[in-house]
Amino acid sequence: MATVHVPPQMRDLTAGAAEVEIDGRNLRAVIAALDARFPGFQARVVVAGRLSPGIAVSIDHVVTSLGLIARVGETSVIHFVPAIAGGT
Amino acid sequence: MAKKRHVTTTINGEAAEFLCEPRQSLLEVLRDTLGLTGSKEGCNNGNCGACTVLLDGVPVDSCLVLAVEVEGAQIITVEGLASEGHLHPLQQCFLEGAALQCGICTPGFLVTAKALLDHDPAPSERQIRFELAGNICRCTGYDKIVRAVQAAGRKLQEHQREQQRT
Amino acid sequence: MDRDFNHSQVIKDPADRYQVLGTRPVRHDGVDKVTGRAVYGNDVKLPGLLHGRILRSPHAHARIKSIDTRAAEKHPGVFAVITSADFPDLRTKTAHLGEGAVDLAHLAANCLAREKVLYRGHAVAAVAARSVHDAEAALAKIRVEYERLPAVTWVLDAMADDAPLLHYNVFTDEMGRKSAKPSNISQHLHFEHGDVDKAFAGCDIVVEREFRTASVHQGYIEPHVSTALWNQDGHLKIWTSTQGAFTARQQTAELLEIPVSQVTVVPCEIGGGFGGKIAVYLEPVVALLSRKTGRPVKIHMTRAEVFEGTGPTPGSFLRVKVGMKKRKMHAAEAWLAYDAGAFPGGMIGPGCMCVFSCYDIPHARVDGYDVCLNKPKTQAYRAPGATHAAFAMESVVDEIAERLGVDPIDLRLENAAKEGTRRVDGPVYPRIGLVETLEAAKKHDHWRSRLEGPNRGRGVASGFWFNIGLKSSATVHLNPDGKVSLLEGSTDIGGTRTSVAMQLAETLGIAAADVHPQVADTDGVGYTDVTGGSRVTFATGLAAHEAGKDLIRQLCERAALIWECAPDLVRFAAGVFTHAKEKKSLTFRELAAELHETGGTITARATVDPQGATNGFGTHIVDVEVDPETGKVTVLRYTAIQDAGKAVHPSYVEGQMQGGAVQGIGWALNEEYIFDGEGRMTNPTMLDYRMPTALDVPMIDTVIVEVPNPSHPFGVRGVGETPIVAPPAAIANAIHAATGVRLRELPMSPPRVWAALEAALRREE
């Protein structure tokens, strides 16, 4: 089971749970599974069929650029973090 | 709109002439009329030095010089630093010393530094920084620019010594 | 001032066996740049070119009641006038721009105001004319009727319930949950791990301080400039000063509601960007003027327009609280409010994620707010949001070190983030180099030497930035003489054409001078994300490396053809192709010479989207002298130490460190937007917006520590942004050491330093 760390601002949906075990072969499946268990989760992080633009997802501590099709391993750790902007 | 004036001058050692409106700056005329786009517009009010040219050997912000003022003068722009296919030692030292990053301020620095080294080929670090204080660079932090000017000064002195020997 | 200290050091990885990487070749575009031949945006000339100017709002906040352009349209020499009415009316749309999202309706309104002007300098209308002077004169004939509204320019004021509201359709977002009422607060972020309140209760020492920073501009010497030709066949071509041709293309296409394939963007040589040339301002405006006039149109901003009309970095308010159990950081809390500027979408995310990122703190909590107010829309400025956070945190760490009587570097070493440390936003660090930079600082002559003299002090601070990966493409063609053409899509802001070319040369076993790199336009190379986020040497270098491997694979197949053997019998090493079983070999150059007669030239390509850009850490040491009579702070000595992974071209890595440090010095000591009571910037010139000159700074010594990045074939880490993060904190700490006074507001300009010293004197009396 993958472990999803629920951001503090989304724990209103998970009755306060900070970590949730969930199954899914990719991010889309994981979010769908989260939404099934905690209704409203998907609407918070998915907009028009893609990850909400202000949100990035790190899978096993690396931010993925593949969006919802990013693969999730059987023991992956998932965090939702703000998307970064950079300048040089 | 006032009638255009005819100006005759010398640019990079060559006779040049142009027509300009009295309100046009030397920078504008160099870039837009004469096609010498090496001098850059950074601020257009004399604070960044990206438009520096030599006017009778003196570094000036060409955005603060009216084109009509250069009648009969000798102007050197960045395009006049290399000669006969060879880079000026300043240009060479800037390249070898990585003294540029985006390069937009580089023409202004080269021209100002040339005036400095023509006057004194062995300036101290403080003198270099003082003379270059009118040229702003946002990319390099100035360290490699100062070192490149020092290196170019040494090269020029070497050339001078070689010429004296022959 | 004439003393030379240690200059520069590279602490190499002992396993390093590179031939090209780590050398210092002259950059490939160098001669053009020292002779004035390089073509920057304002050097672009086209037949029939028209020149444009933009009319900007004199008010910081107002409703636009009407715009009458008729008199301007009739002005001699004028060919067209446009307003936001010429833009498509976009419903709220968001384009994924690779480096963060943008709301397209807001982006369009920032290019030309719709309904309201939200800051002084907000663009309202644009004119295309025969000359810049004609355009300028026509601006004066445009009649705009404004209904003035109260303006707000300090972030805390903008958060108040009774603050003037900028947008009726912006709500406070909390990870996807929106507030019921519109607000200037467009986002509230909250991160937490551990049990913070309980942890604070168990601490021996707790230090809590507040900090303020002013708006600061990226300060590139080249103003924004764009030229557009909307041709009669409907194709739009744009020459522009941009950090990303592909993002400029996408933004322009989306704003004008035309297909991306209808637009070509040519990235000119760029005169500085630092994050401020990613969002478009001029491209869609010149495009519309070109479509209306049937001629190419160029607009080049004036310096005042750059200050008043383009994004500064956020001004901010920060409160940081740290609790210690003996010498260990046990609990920490931060409350951050950052300007978003006139439209939502500022840098609060990275700010929140950076504030505690240098340390291993088991219990931590961060609240951050993105706040709209009547200033230009903020844009990224080199490690956006991190410098503010470091100013606060590194000052608090310094204060704690002093209270504990511990050396400030030792305190950092004992609490430093390492591989496996968890950040407050959740993810865990891979292999990182903070400890190495602290150890190098501790050993450095600068830290060990005595600083003599009155009013002098030494400060140290560390900084962190993420670095990103994102997408890059590269195409490689092989010439018959063995030289290689490399097409890549990363605007060269600081010598990256060369650092990318060097990686290709290393892969192929040839000299850097045998690679001819070119930055191509959006038709000439595959999609490439912006030059930003410290990504080019990492990601575009990777693309060049992968294209190099593709080239070698194809060359092996060609050698197999020539040798009439199976391709898997061809080996390549150190620039030579050999037959595994027979005594046959061809050098790279020899094989290249055979290509034309054996089937034709070879083209290789790659597209990458790498993970694992990892993080950049730096530690800076600075000595200052404070003049008590004027408050002026002189920087006597500066050393910047950073982990670069692998310094591909050490001179340009040093250059990034030195440039970032000096920008940080300016931010620390002088730079700020000074607003009057009406929300107008009173200092929009380079004289009064005071950036450092050569006379203001000493040599910047550098130490590059190479801790290879395991996610890159050459160990590369991005380096460009991290150097701007530590300087203001290091300088604040040095001023404290020199005077006993701590300044907690940026800039620490002479009037502020003087006032703080006076106040301290009065307290003593």
Image: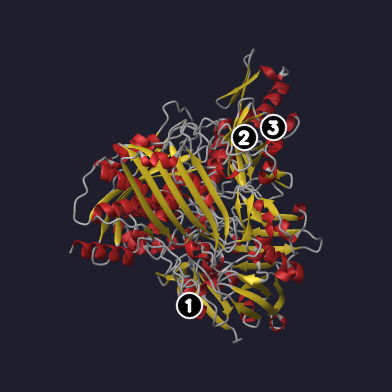
Query: In the picture provided, is C634 more to the left or to the right than C652?
Result: left
Residue indicated by mark 2: C482
Residue C712 position (above or below residue B42): above
> Quarter of the image holding residue A35?
top right
Residue A36 in view (yes/no): yes
Marks 3, 2 in one chain: no
Front one among C609 and C289: C609
Residue indicated by mark 1: B70
Distance between the alpha carbons at the discs numbered 3 and 2: 45 Å
Front one among C566 and C637: C637
Residue A28 position (above or below residue C557): below
Residue indicated by mark 3: A26
Q: Quadrant of the C terminus of chain C?
A: bottom left
> Do the numbered discs 3 and 1 sit on residues whose CB atoms are within 8 Å?
no
Q: Which amino acid type is shown beneath numbered disc 3?
A: Asn
Q: How many marks?
A: 3
Residue C164: x and y in percent read 56, 69
Distance between the alpha carbons at the discs numbered 2 and 1: 50 Å
Q: Which residue is at 41% across, 43% downward?
A: C332
Residue C207: x and y in percent read 34, 48
Q: Which amino acid type is shown beneath numbered disc 1?
A: Val
Chain to which mark 1 belongs: B
Residue C104: x and y in percent read 68, 58
